[in-house]
Amino acid sequence: MAVGDVAQVIRCQPSAFDAILLDVDNGPEGMTQEDNDWLYAPKGLAAIRAALKPGGVLAVWSVEAVPRFTTALNRAGFTVHVRTARARGDRGAKHTIWIARVPVEARTKSR
C-alpha cells in the first residue's frame, strides 16, 4: 500500500502494484481538479500501466459513462470491462466503474 500523491506514487514505482483504485475527481473528465487530467490521458495511463504488475488491475470510478475513456484504456494496452452500479443498492444514480487489467502475456513479452 502507498499513501501520497497518486501521480508521485505511480511514477516512482514500476511494476509495484497489484491494483490501483482511482476515485478522484468525478471520473476521467477531471471535473474537479484539472491537475489530475493527466491521469486519464495517454501519458497518465501509460504510467499507471507501468506501475502495475503483470495481471494488475486499474479500477476507476466515475459519476457518468465516458465512452472515449474506454477507448483510451484499450489504446493504453488494458483489457477493459465497464460496469454500472447504483449509488445506494438498487436505488440512486448510476455510476460507471472501469475495470482495466494489464494482460499478463503482454507485460512478460515486453521485458
Image (cartoon, rainbow, N blue to C red):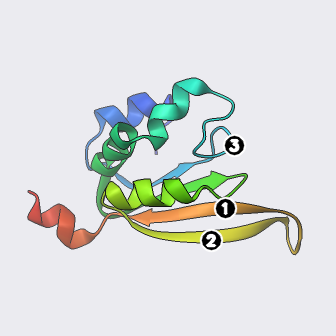
In the image, 35 versus 51, the foreground residue is 35
| Amino acid at dot 1 | Thr
Give amino acid for label 3. Asn
Q: Which label's residue is closer to the chain start, 1 or 3?
A: 3
The answer to whether residue 71 is above or below residue 12 is below
> Can you say whether 32 is above or below 92 in the image?
above
Q: Which residue is disc 2 drawn over? A: 83
20 versus 108 height, above or below? above
Q: Which residue is mark 3?
A: 26
On the image, the x and y values in percent for residue 36 come to 53, 31
Tell me residue 10's x, y (percent).
37, 38
Q: CA distance from mark 1 to mark 2?
A: 6 Å
Badge 2 marks a residue whose secondary structure is strand
Mark 1 surroundings within 10 Å by alpha-carbon count, few (fewer than 14), some (14 through 19), many (20 or more): some
In this image, 73 relative to 60: left or right? left
Cα distance, mark 2 to mark 3?
16 Å
| Quadrant assignment, res 57 | bottom left
Residue marked by disc 1: 96
| Number of marks | 3
